[in-house]
Amino acid sequence: MILSPRDIQRSFWALSAGETLELLETNYKGLDESEVARRRALFGRNAFEEKRRLSRLAIFLGQFKSPLILILVFAGVVTVVLRELGNAVVIFAAVLANTVLGYYQEYKAESAISLLQSYIKRRARVVRGDKEMEIEADGLVPGDIIRLLPGDRVPADARFVFVNDLQADESILTGESLPVPKTTEPTSFQAATADRAAMTFSGTLIVQGMGDAVVTAIGAETELGKIARLVGGAKEEPTPLQKAIGNFSFKASLALGAMVALLFFLGIWYGYGIFEMFLISVAVAVSAVPEALPIALTVILAIGVQRIAKRKGIIRKLVATETLGSTTLILTDKTGTLTEAKMEISAVIPFGHDGRDDDRQHELLRIALLNSEAAIENPDDAPSEWRIIGRALEVALVKGAARLGLRMPEVVSNAKVVDRLPFSSLAKYSGALLQTDGHHLVTLVGAPEILLASSALTPRTRAEAVATVNELAYAGARVIGMARKEIKGAAPPASWKKKPEGFEFAGLIAFRDPVRATVKDAIARIHQAGVRTVIVTGDHQGTAEAVAKTVGFSLGARSVLTGPDLELMGEAEFSRILPDIQVFARVSPEQKLQIAKAYKNRGETVAMTGDGVNDAPALKEANIGVAVGSGTDVAKSVADLVILDDNFETIVAAIEEGRKILENIRKVLVYLLSNALDALLLIGGALLMGVPIPLNALQILWVNFFTDSFPAIALSFEHGDDDVGTKPKRLHKNLFDPEMRFLVLVIGTLTSFLLFAAYALLLRFSSDPLMVRTFIFAAFGLYSLFLIFSVRSLHKSIFEYNFFSNPYLLGSVLVGFALMAAAIYWPPLQNILETVPLAWPWVLGVIGVGVLNIIAIELGKLFYRNRE
């Protein structure tokens, strides 16, 4: 019998596990690779149909939605009707240039953001050929046997064939807020999705227990896939910053529109023709409105997100790039983030009897291995070649035990495990129920203090155990404890999982995990930038303190707070001592949430790391939730930032890039808006003063083409300064901080008045009005290109950074100079734009205007640097 798509369209929840396996032509050992390849060709990839991106033509035509572009098109049509063909050519050239540039920017930004989807891959544990392995979830096929553990996001619809106290959060599908218990027993054919207890569904979350399931549907055929098809057209919401800039652009457009209308009627009042004033007014409007601002913002964010990705950090939510630069506090876990997550067994210490012989050590290791959820993909290879799936501590346990002569596959095959209790970050231990000759054995592995509390020990033995744990922990070791309890006769009831009592404390296993070499420098660097680091860990106080001292913390008497102490503390007292605390140890996930809230209430912008299911509320509460790459799917799904290498330095790098993103946004705002009123003031001033208008419509459009486009986008590629500053960056709610307002409104307006004053004086003392107008045209066009070198940094002098470090900016400036030179010295353009060649004294004057503008901006920057 050959499996076909029709065979998997069954009500598997109403069939037994055996019937399901038979229909899907599989078994508990899983499919072999040849069958997987055949089914993949038949059923395709386990992925939803990707949201269709806009075609290139649609993006190009979308540029004509801009009111300014439509006005230009209308103006061009009018010039054609009036047979002003020279004007028409320039106007339509401006239309084409603006639409092509807008298309390029939007297409590049969309491509950059969509590329990020390839960085984070969903993973799944699967049994194939009787071997457990980890694969990319999109490689699953119907009939695969998948293994599900707490924190896993279910990768496909599947029918359970084995469960152990398993519960799933299916709220994404059913709206049911409480976890749903799962079973292998069939239910009614008519059962609704929420009542199919033997099924698990793609996208839901395993919150408790463990289980094996056979895949019944993948990709678009899953319950979630069917919903995705219905809502596939939903548009992504703009970020708050995009909304703010959009609102600003709209309000600025209204204000400028009113001024341009006033300019139009003022020109007619002074005797200029309607058509001439219409063209000038359109050109002034195009010049004044920063139409490139929303696109420039998107490009900056997209480029910033890509840069963070190159540094091993994946931004899941674009809004996070706006918050990263404002971060004032990092709440970081210890294991894997500050340490290398390359644990090794450093000591195996049995308790009871004689204590420390090899047999007792091996017994401890057997207990730990039987409680482990780790899986070996290639168990037949030498232990040094094993590919092990699991948490860092479990990987170290499996490798260390093999070096001491205990191979996990043999230990597991020689033991009969009747039941399991998966590890819980709340209970802080895992358990296994083993059947041996004539009796049962319950083993527990977890936090030593929890197991010591449930064990029957003499005061002397308990004190010895506590002293040993503290000694190891304060030396920087990670310590786990083992406990056991023999039960004669029948298996105990399930209550053994709820409250362990009367156990024998068997011993300890200690692990060492070296601190990452780069962490100390990274913490010092980010501290100089005004960001505090606080360690928040579930580990023993001694272990946390040892790591803190290694990474450069100077701990005082009130620097460390433990979870149990926090429980006894009132909210007011906790808030009072919060600034002094540098390390939180032995905290629960619920306390992580409490800590994040407390810091936010103090006005901190908090970035918090996490990896487990129960870390999700704290990650959501933090301003920036940071999930480690090796963490659970639950943590990643709520996080704003995923650090692929689990490294603390990646968080620091992301914050540094976030600051550069905000700085680039500020630069673009200052650049685009500092010359927004230039044409309006020049034309309006000329009308009010009764002198000839210094610029015609085509000259204004010509300048707008190369000043408001290429340079603004070039600023998006600024890498920023190596010095990210000593204070967190923030964008003001109305986008402008006092320095930006000063540079845009005061300096920008002042230089515009100076340019008009120069025009009025030159007209009085020069005998060649056309030469003066050409000079003003050149100065009006080029001084913005001078200005951009000054706004490359808003907190450093122009002499403190490398002029040539941004090739895109240099290229845009050279293009601008070339176009202006062509407009003045190339006869065909001279005729169209009404210019004459400038002699060297006039050229030096143009350069002088540009230099004067730079000096004005630099003085403004110096004023604010001195104030800081």
Image: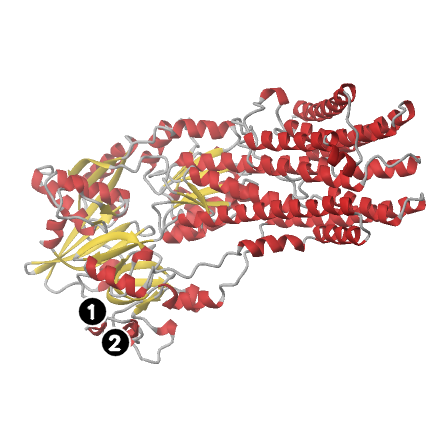
Is 742 on the left or on the right of 264, as rendered?
Answer: left
Quarter of the picture containing the C terminus is top right
Res. 570 in view: no
State if disc 2 and disc 1 touch (CB < 8 Å). no
Please tell me which residue is depicted at 28% across the width and 52% down the height of the picture: 135
Q: Residues within 10 Å of mark 1 (few under 14, many from 20)?
A: some
Res. 38 in view: yes
For the residue marked with disc 1, what is the amino acid? Glu
Residue 275, horizontal then vertical, whole percent: 85, 49
* Residue 343 falls in image quadrant: top left
Quarter of the picture containing the N terminus is bottom left
Is 187 on the left or on the right of 298, as rendered?
Answer: left
The tag on residue 25 is 1
Residue 531, horizontal then vertical, whole percent: 51, 33
The tag on residue 404 is none
Please tell me which residue is depicted at 54% across the width and 41% down the height of the picture: 605
Instruction: Give the labeled residue for mark 2.
Output: 15
For the residue marked with disc 2, what is the amino acid? Leu
Q: Work out whether residue 851 or residue 147 is closer to the camera in this orientation and state it.
A: 851
Q: Helix or strand or loop: what does disc 1 sit on?
A: loop
Question: Is residue 80 depicted above or below 746 in this figure?
Answer: below
Q: Work out whether residue 176 or residue 757 is closer to the camera in this orientation and state it.
A: 757
Please tell me which residue is depicted at 89% across the width and 47% down the height of the picture: 273
Looking at this rendering, what residue extends furthest in the left direction?
437
Residue 212, horizontal then vertical, whole percent: 24, 62
* Residue 225 falls in image quadrant: bottom left
Is 395 on the left or on the right of 335, as rendered?
Answer: left
Q: CA distance from mark 1 to mark 2?
A: 14 Å
Is 858 on the left or on the right of 214, as rendered?
Answer: right
Q: Residues within 10 Å of mark 2 (few under 14, many from 20)?
A: many
